[in-house]
Image (tube, rainbow, N blue to C red):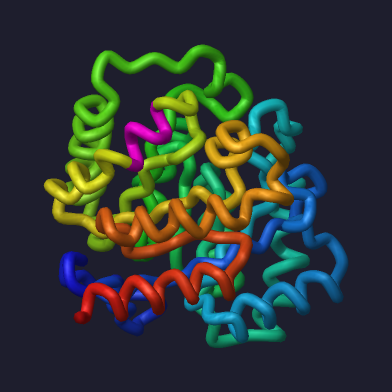
Amino acid sequence: MKGLLPYTINVGGKLMDLSEPQVMGILNVTPDSFYSASRKNSEAEVRERVNAIISEGGSIIDIGAYSSRPGADNIFASEEMNRLRGALQILRSEAPEAVVSVDTFRADVAKMCVEEYGVQIINDISGGELDPQMFQTVAALGVPYILMHMKGNPQTMQVEPHYDDLLTEMLQYFGSKVQQLHELGVKDVILDPGFGFAKTLEHNYELMNRMQDLQVLGLPMLVGVSRKSMIYRLLGGTPEGALNGTSVLNTLALLKGASILRVHDVKEAAEVVQIVKKMLAC
């Protein structure tokens, strides 16, 4: 698509072209994710969600078993692994060829998912900050890594987050970590600005307005704003009523250089991609 950097990532030995925007569908196997409709805990619910993501236009399934919303339970790695094993077994039986990312900040969990279930991408909300073994583990596994920006930890990140200059600090953060990853041999790095993570409402909209500044790093970007509080706190309401605002922000994100949209509502996001592609092609 016009405006996106030519970039491919190696997912399980196959190249995915990120110059064409991709839609990543969220599969939560948690009892406490912030958007209640996204929680899938039975075998039937997981199967239904996997098939819905694929049929509605999702090219990546992002599975997570640890809720990162502020105040969520801090479960042990063993519990996270148990949840993921059950869901990944169902996912792989239903869609063995699907491109799957695992949303985890724990290196042991990432290793298990890649080695036991062929997960192709690691999606780490902490940028390696919560597990010092993560970068080396990703390098050893040879999989793409989604590097997100966050300060602090999920339980405390929203307690008065402060930046002297948001984008300058983010560029320094990403620049340093990308260098570490490349020195370890990680070839495919995707940046996630971390909307809603250690950022006030004003920070989130400043970030969206200036997101194109991150393109100086020359790496593809993933944006996850789906049904987040930056929408419903501004407009009033709840996550359940935030689909329209999500589509607006996804449209802006694509125009500002996003390569991947991480969403709950796959069909609507795929339609956003189709419309923006058509407009930019004219």
Q: Which quadrant of the structure image shows residue 208?
A: top left
Residue 47, compared with residue 141, is above or below; it is below
Question: Residue 210: x, y in percent?
Answer: 25, 39
User: Is 206 in the magenta?
Assistant: yes
Q: In this view, does 203 lie to the left or right of 211?
A: right
The reply to whether residue 119 is in sight is no
* The one of 136 and 243 positioned closer to us in this rendering: 243
Image quarter where the C terminus lies is: bottom left
Main secondary-structure element of the magenta-colored stretch: helix
Image quarter where the N terminus lies is: bottom left
| Picture residue at 27% right of the left edge, 32% below the top | 170
User: Is 126 in the magenta?
Assistant: no
Residue 17, compared with residue 141, is above or below; it is below
Question: Residue 89: x, y in percent?
Answer: 72, 74
Q: Is residue 153 left or right of residue 39?
A: left
| Picture residue at 23% right of the left edge, 73% below the top | 280
* The one of 169 and 21 positioned closer to us in this rendering: 21
Q: Is residue 78 left or right of residue 201?
A: right
* The one of 12 and 39 positioned closer to us in this rendering: 39
| Picture residue at 34% right of the left edge, 71% below the top | 276
For the image shown, how many numbered marks are present on the structure?
A: 0
| Picture residue at 48% right of the left edge, 28% below the top | 201
Question: Residue 31: x, y in percent?
Answer: 81, 48
The reply to whether residue 174 is in sight is yes
Question: Residue 157: x, y in percent?
Answer: 53, 23
Q: What stretch is highlighted in magenta?
A: 203-208
